[in-house]
């Protein structure tokens, strides 16, 4: 199975800052079938990005995704207070689908 | 509005089984895929498996294969997960998530069902 490694594990940032999260796959992800989720305590995860770069419905344009093959990136151009959470990547192009271990973005 | 509503919390003894349901509304259930993801306290999200609603085809995480069964009932728009031979380490919050009509991935999530395995 494909192992997804996210980096860094934790980031401490201030509102207004730009953040780039990495998701690296142990082998190439078929068809750019990679999604990003945001997960806050006490809530269900929320889909942000699918197909590596397509924003899900209702997601602000400060969130963007890029990448292909084994290297993928989620960028938040300017962090808003409500953006602080754990972010997960998931590949669903290869069987079985797998999730990364998550990156926590916390308020500095 | 697209919704998934999951069944309530469960407390089970080791070795028994649990069934969690996930009722869909507001989108075309028969065209969807429903995945199950779990999170133990303080741990990462873990993919459990999925079911393609139309065909009934399933896929499971290797770790849990053989103990989990996914079913769907298109007359009630309900997907279910049954986990057998429960172990203490199965204690987790279980989420179902579905692919909506205009999405390429899992954009509709249930509220989560807490399953506790305790003797």
Image: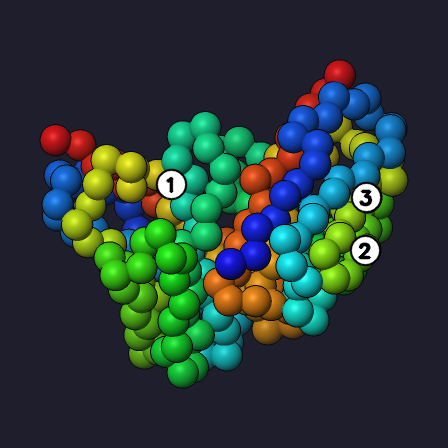
Residue in the picture at 80% in, 57% down: A67
Name, please, the residue furthest toward the top: A108
Q: Quadrant of residue B71?
A: bottom left
Residue B76 in sight: no
Image position of A40 with respect to B49: above or below:
above
Q: Using the image as rendered, state which of residue B16 and residue A14 is in the foreground.
A: B16
Name, please, the residue furthest toward the bottom: B55
Q: Using the image as rendered, state which of residue B23 and residue B12 is in the foreground.
A: B12
Q: Earlier in the sequence, mark 3 or mark 2?
A: 2
Disc 1/disc 3 C-alpha distance (Å): 28 Å
The quarter of the picture where the C terminus of chain A appears is: top right
**Residue A99: horizontal and vertical position, in percent?**
55, 50
Q: Do callouts 3 and 2 mark residues in contact (Cβ within 8 Å)? A: yes
The residue where tag 1 is placed is B93
Q: Quadrant of residue A90?
A: bottom right
Tell me the chain of label 1. B
Q: In terms of secondary structure, where does tag 3 sit? A: strand
Q: Using the image as rendered, state which of residue A87 and residue B26 is in the foreground.
A: A87
The residue where tag 3 is placed is A75
Residue A103 in sight: yes
Disc 3/disc 2 C-alpha distance (Å): 8 Å
The residue where tag 2 is placed is A66
Q: Nearer the viewer, mark 1 or mark 3?
A: 3
Q: In terms of secondary structure, where does tag 2 sit? A: strand
Tell me the chain of label 2. A
Q: Quadrant of residue B64?
A: bottom left
């Amino acid at each position: 199975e494909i192992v997804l490694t996210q980096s860094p594990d934790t980031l401490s940032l201030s509102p207004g800052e730009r953040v780039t999260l990495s998701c690296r796959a142990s082998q190439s992800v078929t068809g750019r079938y990679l999604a990003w989720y945001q997960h806050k305590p006490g809530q269900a995860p929320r889909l942000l990005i699918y197909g590596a770069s397509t924003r899900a419905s209702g997601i602000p344009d400060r969130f963007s995704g890029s990448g292909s093959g084994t290297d993928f990136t989620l960028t938040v151009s300017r962090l808003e207070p409500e953006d602080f959470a754990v972010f997960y990547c998931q590949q669903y192009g290869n069987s079985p689908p797998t999730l990364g271990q998550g990156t926590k973005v916390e308020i500095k | 509005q697209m919704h998934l509503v999951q069944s309530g919390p469960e407390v089970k003894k080791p070795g028994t089984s649990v069934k969690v349901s996930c009722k869909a509304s507001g989108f075309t259930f028969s065209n969807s895929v429903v995945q199950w993801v779990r999170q133990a306290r303080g741990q990462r999200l873990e993919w459990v498996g999925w079911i393609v609603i139309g065909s009934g085809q399933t896929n499971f995480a290797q770790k849990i294969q053989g103990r989990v069964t996914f079913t769907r009932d298109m007359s009630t728009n309900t997907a279910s997960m049954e986990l057998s031979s429960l172990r203490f380490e199965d204690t987790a919050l279980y989420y179902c998530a579905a692919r909506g009509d205009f999405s390429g991935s899992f954009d509709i999530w249930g509220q989560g069902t807490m399953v506790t395995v305790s003797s």
